[in-house]
Image (tube, rainbow, N blue to C red):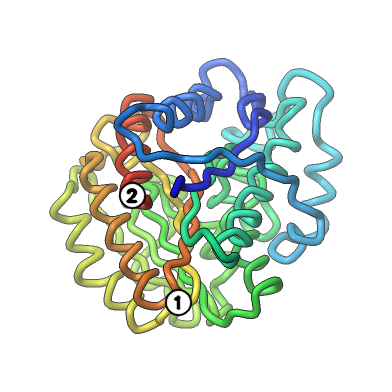
C-alpha cells in the first residue's frame, strides 16, 4: 500500500526572499526524493486549508489575526530577522497546518496507519502567540490539538529530531500532561532553549547534543532517555517533527547524522506506534537546509515509515 503524503503546490510559492535558507528548493528536493526509484511508493494527497478554529486551539487570536492582516500583496515582509511572508505565504502556512490535520484524520481511518506531510513553511518554532524561526503556524501542535478534539484520545507523543529545539511546541504544551514532547537538538544553537531542566509538568524530555555529536550520541539519547519514556507514556498517537538539519551536510548546524540515523530513529518510532497507538504515526517536515541531505534523508525516512 502506498504511503499517503499530504502536500500542496502553493507550499512552493512561499518565498522568504533571495538567499534565505528556507527556500522553495527545500521542498522541491523532498518531492524529487519521493519520485526516486529508491523511495517506497507514495500517494500524494492535496492538503486542505486549516480552519481558524483549528489554529485557535493552539494559537492566540491576536497572533492569528495579525498574520492574516500582515499578508502582503507582493514582495516580502519580515516579521522578525528570520521569518518572512510573501503573497502566498499565508495560504501555504494554512495548507501546511491543514495537511497535518488531514493526515491525523487519515491514520484514524480504516486503511492507513502512517502518513507524511511534505509542506512548508515549517512550524515547530511558532509559539502560542509569536511566529518565529521561519515558522508561521505550529503545524504539529495544530495537528495534536485537532486529534484531541476529533478523535477522543487522551495521550499524544510528539518527537522532534530537528537540530533546533522546537521551542514553540514546548511552549504550547508545557502545561498539558496529555502531551509528551521529546526533543534532541544541538546546544548551544538557535533558539537557545531546550535545557534538560525544562520539564514542563514532567511531560517535556529534552536531550541536548553538543556540536560535533553524531550517530552514537543521537542513538544513545533515544535508547537511554526518549524511547523508555515513550513506552511508559504509551501514546495513542505518535507525531514526528521531522527536521533533517542534524545531518552532517547541513550548513546551519554542527551535528553529524546521516540518512541511516534517520532510518533507524524512524523505525524505532514506528515500533512505539505499533506497540501503543495501533500503528498511528504522522510525520511532518520541519528543517533541513542541505538539498543533498534532504534527498537522502527523505528517502530513508519514507522507507522506514512504509
The residue carrying mark 2 is 188
The residue carrying mark 1 is 235
SS category of the residue bearing label 2? loop
Disc 1 crowd rating (10 Å Cα; few below 14, some 14-19, many 20+) is many
Residue farthest left in this picture: 216
Q: Is residue 298 left or right of residue 217?
A: right
Foreground tag (2 vs 1)? 1
Name the residue nearer the viewer: 254 or 8: 8
* Residue at x 41%, y 36% (from the top left corner): 288
Residue 91: image x %, image y %? 75, 37
SS category of the residue bearing label 1? loop
Name the residue nearer the viewer: 16 or 80: 16
Residue 167: image x %, image y %? 51, 57
Residue 170: image x %, image y %? 51, 64
On screen, 66 above or below 251? below
* Residue at x 31%, y 50% (from the top left corner): 304
Amino acid at each position: 500500500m502506498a504511503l499517503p503524503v499530504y502536500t500542496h503546490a502553493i507550499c512552493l510559492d512561499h518565498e522568504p526572499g533571495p538567499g534565505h535558507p528556507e527556500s522553495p528548493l527545500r521542498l522541491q528536493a523532498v518531492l524529487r526524493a519521493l519520485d526516486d526509484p529508491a523511495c517506497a511508493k507514495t500517494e500524494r494527497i492535496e492538503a486542505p486549508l486549516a480552519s481558524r478554529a483549528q489554529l485557535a486551539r493552539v494559537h492566540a487570536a491576536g497572533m492569528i489575526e495579525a498574520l492574516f492582516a500582515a499578508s502582503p500583496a507582493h514582495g516580502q515582509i519580515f516579521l522578525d530577522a528570520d521569518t518572512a511572508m510573501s503573497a502566498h505565504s499565508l495560504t501555504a502556512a494554512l495548507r501546511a497546518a491543514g495537511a497535518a490535520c488531514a493526515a491525523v484524520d487519515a491514520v484514524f481511518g480504516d486503511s492507513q496507519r502512517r502518513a507524511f506531510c511534505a509542506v512548508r513553511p515549517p512550524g515547530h518554532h511558532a509559539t502560542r502567540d509569536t511566529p518565529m524561526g521561519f515558522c508561521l503556524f505550529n503545524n504539529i501542535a495544530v495537528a495534536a490539538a485537532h486529534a484531541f478534539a476529533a478523535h477522543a484520545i487522551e495521550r499524544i507523543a510528539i518527537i522532534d529530531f530537528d537540530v533546533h529545539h522546537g521551542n514553540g511546541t514546548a511552549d504550547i504544551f508545557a502545561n498539558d500532561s496529555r502531551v509528551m514532547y521529546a526533543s534532541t537538538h544541538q546546544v548551544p544553537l538557535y533558539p537557545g532553549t531546550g535545557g534538560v531542566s525544562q520539564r514542563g509538568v514532567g511531560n517535556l524530555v529534552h536531550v541536548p547534543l553538543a556540536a560535533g555529536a553524531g550517530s552514537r550520541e543521537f542513538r544513545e539519547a533515544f535508547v537511554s532517555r526518549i524511547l523508555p519514556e515513550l513506552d511508559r507514556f504509551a501514546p495513542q498517537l505518535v507525531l514526528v517533527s521531522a527536521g533533517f538539519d542534524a545531518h552532517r551536510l547541513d550548513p546551519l548546524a554542527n551535528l553529524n547524522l546521516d540518512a541511516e540515523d534517520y532510518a533507524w530513529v524512524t523505525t524505532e518510532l514506528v515500533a512505539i506506534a505499533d506497540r501503543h497507538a495501533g500503528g498511528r504515526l504522522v510525520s511532518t517536515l520541519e528543517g533541513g537546509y542541505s538539498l543533498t541531505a534532504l534527498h537522502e534523508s527523505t528517502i530513508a525516512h519514507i522507507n522506514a515509515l512504509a
